[in-house]
Image: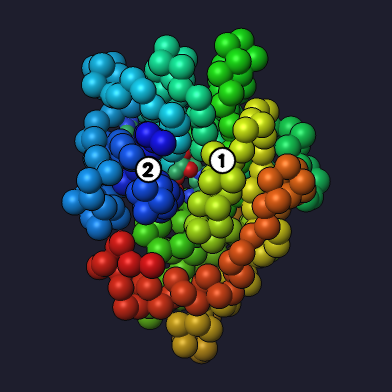
Amino acid sequence: MKILITGGAGFLGSYLCEKYVNDGHVVYALDNLMNGNLNNIRILLHKKNFKFLHDDIRRDELYQKLPTDLDAILHLAAQIHVDRSVVNPAETFKINVEGTLKVLEFARMNDVKKVLYASTSEVYGTAKYTPMNENHPLLASHPYGVSKIAADRLCYTYNETYDLGVDIIRCFNLFGPRQKDTGYGGVIAIFINRVLQNKPPIIYGDGTQTRDYMYVRDAVIAYDKVLMSDNNPGRNGINFGSGTEISINEIAELVIKYAAQKDMKIIYVEPRPIEVQRLFADISMARKLLGFKPQFDFRKGLSTLVDWYTNYKSELWMY
Ligand SMILES: NC(=O)c1ccc[n+]([C@@H]2O[C@H](COP(=O)([O-])OP(=O)(O)OC[C@H]3O[C@@H](n4cnc5c(N)ncnc54)[C@H](O)[C@@H]3O)[C@@H](O)[C@H]2O)c1
């Protein structure tokens, strides 16, 4: 297959590039490097079946130079930081919504058979009930989440109006090596970085807020199952998560334990009003339609990550 991965130098994108290059497909990774890093894909750069395009999904000229015979587009490029989206909502909407519109239009014009869109559990906002299935109302309230709702629904519109066959993938929180320790989603990376510098984790609120953290390699399995499926299982959105709900307190305690800092005391500060309180995925649709079952245990993934931060952080492509 000939596959375009937008956001290919980012955290999740780099793992997907690696998978499809190693499987022998021809992979084009597109990234403007605003949050990505060439080091994430350094081991792929010399491969014959890999090409990196340093460009921006907002730029019309980009679409003149893309191959017109793509079999699939995995559209991950996005401004992912909630705080940045609050400071500059226009930028986030231009990238996440208008950028997605341009990618979809390109796919429509060129009859691309498979388009996978990286939506997110953030579209749901704080859980009204758990576990959260795909029918949970879309209640995101911060600009990042709302931009992802808009793009998610835009994909649905392309399915309904043009029968494009986009799969809308709603992963819950991801974690793993290469994730940056800035922003909002990367709480695990932020905790580890602090603890390894002998600084205690800082928790906003009482730490009882929960997340559903899936190891990044399970997300690769999820994307691959969707890509290889003929049935457009994510036509109206499909959840992928770890199957377990974990509190921020538990995460902080485990990081302290794995980093062998047992006397360290967590710092609690005022809660952030925009923060989602509870997230936990119902993944029964993915299980039923795709046989999806998370492979990576949270605690094992976390201890691997602490090891990566301690020993390999400068070699981003490791693991
Ligand atoms: N990390 C998570 O927990 C998570 C969970 C669910 C969904 N997602 C979604 O998965 C996707 C990838 O997330 P990630 O965590 O790997 O983030 P990331 O920031 O590492 O990857 C996004 C990439 O897109 C690139 N990019 C941003 N704007 C661009 C533009 N205008 N043109 C070209 N490239 C651009 C960035 O440089 C970056 O490399 C995002 O769409 C995100 O919303 C992430």
Residue 104 in picture, x, y percent from top left: 46, 20
Left or right of 164, for residue 65: left
Q: Nearer the viewer, residue 245 or 45?
A: 45
Comparing 255 with 306, the one in front is 306
Up/down of 89 relative to 29, above or below: above
The Cα–Cα distance between marks 2 and 1, rounded to whole angstroms, is: 13 Å
The residue that disc 2 covers is 25
Q: Give residue 129's position: percent from left, percent from top.
A: 80, 46
Q: Residue furthest left?
A: 46
- Residue 162 appears at what percent x and percent y? 57, 11
Picture quarter with the N terminus: top left
Q: How far from the left and from the top, in percent, is residue 146? A: 56, 30
* Figure quadrant of the C terminus: bottom left
Label 2 crowd (10 A; few <14 / some 14-19 / many >=20): some
Amino acid residing under circle 1: Met
Q: Which residue is mark 1?
A: 228
Residue at image position (53%, 46%) is 224
Quarter of the picture for ligand 1? Answer: top left
Question: Which comes before the other along the chain, label 2 or label 1?
Answer: 2
Q: Is residue 69 left or right of residue 86?
A: left
- Residue 161 as seen in the image, left or right of residue 316: right
> Residue at position x 50%, y 24% from top?
113
Residue neighbourhood size for the residue with mark 1, other residues' Cα within 10 Å, grouped as few (<14), some (14–19), many (≥20): few
